[in-house]
Amino acid sequence: MKLARTTRTAWFLVLPLLAFLVATFIGPIALMLLRSTYDPELAELMPRTGAALAAWDGAGMPPTTAFDAARADLATSAQQGTTGRLILRLNREGSRLGPLIEATCAALQTRPTAQLMDLDPQWQSRAVWQVLARQTQIFTATHFLNAFDFKADADGNIEPQDPERRIYVPLLLRTLGVAATVTILCALLGYPLAHTIARSGPRLRLVLLFAVMLPFWTSLLVRATAWIVLLQRKGVLNEMLVAVGILGDNQRLELIYNLTGTIIVMVHVLLPFFVLPLYSVMIGLPGAYVRASASLGAWPLYTFWRVYLPLTYPGIASGSILVFVLSLGYYVTPALVGGRTGQLISNQIAFHMQQSLNWGLAAALGSVLLAIVIMIALALPLLTQRGGLRI
């Protein structure tokens, strides 16, 4: 009985945390996954057309009820002023039906009883009805196809996007490349820094840890602005290089508003996320292993390669994964200092959420990033286990 009361008390203490996680983490992720395939907008704008085309197999022309349903939906759209939403939704998928819908809605206001084919001969095209049949479905794979630069043709076959619309796969590859580059640079810079902190005396260690933690206490906007001042063409770094004669005035380096600036600023921001996990591993390593290797006649470099580096591998793996995952979803830094060539997939997601209002595509792109993070999380126990490095 006492155990049961204790269990109930423990659950009451945990329930607020579970509710918080569901509301702020699990719920939004579930909603994102749903929005990536659930798209009822066109079905709500053209409900009669969607119902009439639901049983159509796509062969030949649709039944006459579909023509009457489409005419009624377009007339209603013109009366309610939702024609703009309808055109935007159709053009979003590259269907190029916007001019046809606009012209038909305008004509129906003066000729409400006219047949669609009398208003515009394009309504005799089977391809138009195939697009409407596909887009009026509530659940669709269109957004995921777009996320991988594919599309469905009029017959439903999967084919690559037009060359000018193939932007998401190159952007995703750029994001993965930037994340890998930032991770490697953080490892090269952070490993000696973490080693120095771990082997320093108490006072110097406190100062170095304060220096590592200082970026956490500084606004990200302030840090980005400071880097803009340092790296721009008339910035501090270029002025110093010109002043000492290393560069001419017309040879100033382009270090900002491009991919280079994005990488530099991201390394500065994310370096503590690599140093701190590695430092926590290094500070707990006994020095007896290194001394034993040296006493057996091993050279310092060989001792580092065969003894010290494998022992610090869990910290390297943890810090690298943390930096890589954070780099995948980084948004503020590329938006501020990335310019046109330094944008990442997160900036495209923000664009579709805030400007194009294509939330389905934004959710699909976010789901792709989520899948990558989940695969990394599943591999994390294997990558961080002690002795995982084999040299």
Image (spheres, rainbow, N blue to C red):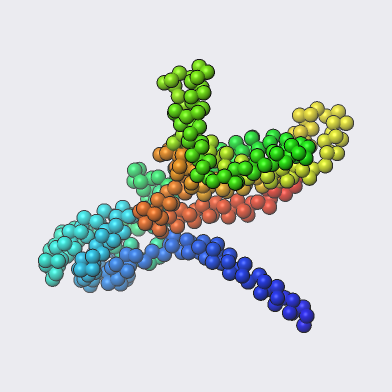
Up the image or down, 137 lies above or below 177; here it is below
Image quadrant where one finds the N terminus: bottom right
**Spot occupied by residue 42 in the image (x, y as percentages of width and height):** 32, 64
Up the image or down, 233 lies above or below 31; here it is above
Question: Residue 53's image quarter?
Answer: bottom left
**Spot occupied by residue 166 in the image (x, y as percentages of width and height):** 38, 45
Residue drawn where x is 55% and y is 51% of the image:
372
Q: In the displayed structure, does residue 380 sit left or right of residue 62?
A: right
Residue drawn where x is 68% and y is 52% of the image:
381
Residue drawn where x is 85% and y is 31% of the image:
294
Of 53 and 312, which appears nearest the observer?
A: 312
Of 371 and 32, which appears nearest the observer?
A: 32
Question: Residue 140's image quarter?
Answer: bottom left
Total of numbered circles in the picture? 0
Q: In the displayed structure, does residue 261 sit left or right of residue 121?
A: right
Image quadrant where one finds the C terminus: top right
**Spot occupied by residue 236 in the image (x, y as percentages of width and height):** 50, 28
Can residue 72 be seen? yes
Q: In the displayed structure, does residue 153 sit left or right of residue 323?
A: left
**Spot occupied by residue 118 in the image (x, y as percentages of width and height):** 12, 63
Residue drawn where x is 32% and y is 67% of the image:
43
Can residue 388 be seen? no
Outermost residue, top side = 245
